[in-house]
Image (cartoon, grey):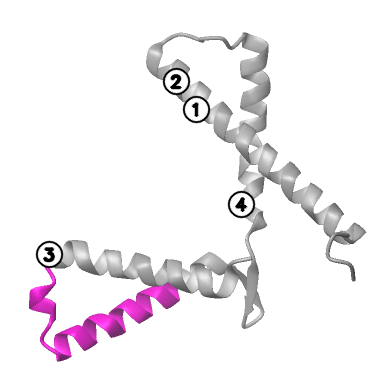
Amino acid sequence: MHAGRVRPANRHRRKRHAEEREYACSILRLTMEIGTSMLTGSKSQMTDTSLLRNAALAGLAPGLTACDPMLSVEGSFWPAWIICLLAGLALSMMESWLLALLRLSSHLGPPLLIYPSLWALNTFVIWLLFYST
């Protein structure tokens, strides 16, 4: 295949992703405008009809939560981020046990800060390794 040519399926996929990104950005802009107007007590440049239209769009935002990958675990489907959270927790527990075994945990700092950060780091790394596109 020629390097400069784009297959029609890829073109359609890119167009769909661009539309999804545009929709998500419009929801973000709406949320920021509503938050700003609520904090300042003014409607800034928004009219009542645009506020209602944008609020209706914001009501559709929970539909975006179904866009994540789903995994079948014993016949029930789980969002991939839950699996990553649990795997990150298990990995951070093993790492904390290893740090205690090597007597390095006393040199790390406050455990209330270190271990949740380790959990988050492991969760994000697992997500990036298995689900980044």
Compared with 3, 104 (above or below) is: below
Q: Say which residue label 4 marks.
A: 65
Residue flagged by tag 2: what amino acid is it?
Thr
Q: Say which residue label 2 marks.
A: 36
Q: Say which residue label 3 marks.
A: 110
**Span of residues in magenta:** 86-110
Considering the whole magenta stretch, tell me its main secondary structure: helix
Viewer-closest of 127 and 79: 127
Residue flagged by tag 1: what amino acid is it?
Met
Alpha-carbon span between mark 1 and mark 3: 35 Å
The reply to whether callout 3 and callout 2 are in contact (CB within 8 Å) is no
Residue flagged by tag 3: what amino acid is it?
Pro
Lower sequence index among marks 3 and 4:
4
Q: How crowded is mark 1: few (under 14 residues within 10 Å), some or many (20 or more)?
A: few
Alpha-carbon span between mark 2 and mark 4: 24 Å
Q: Where is residue 85 in the image (x, y as percent from the top left)?
A: 44, 69
Alpha-carbon span between mark 3 and mark 4: 34 Å
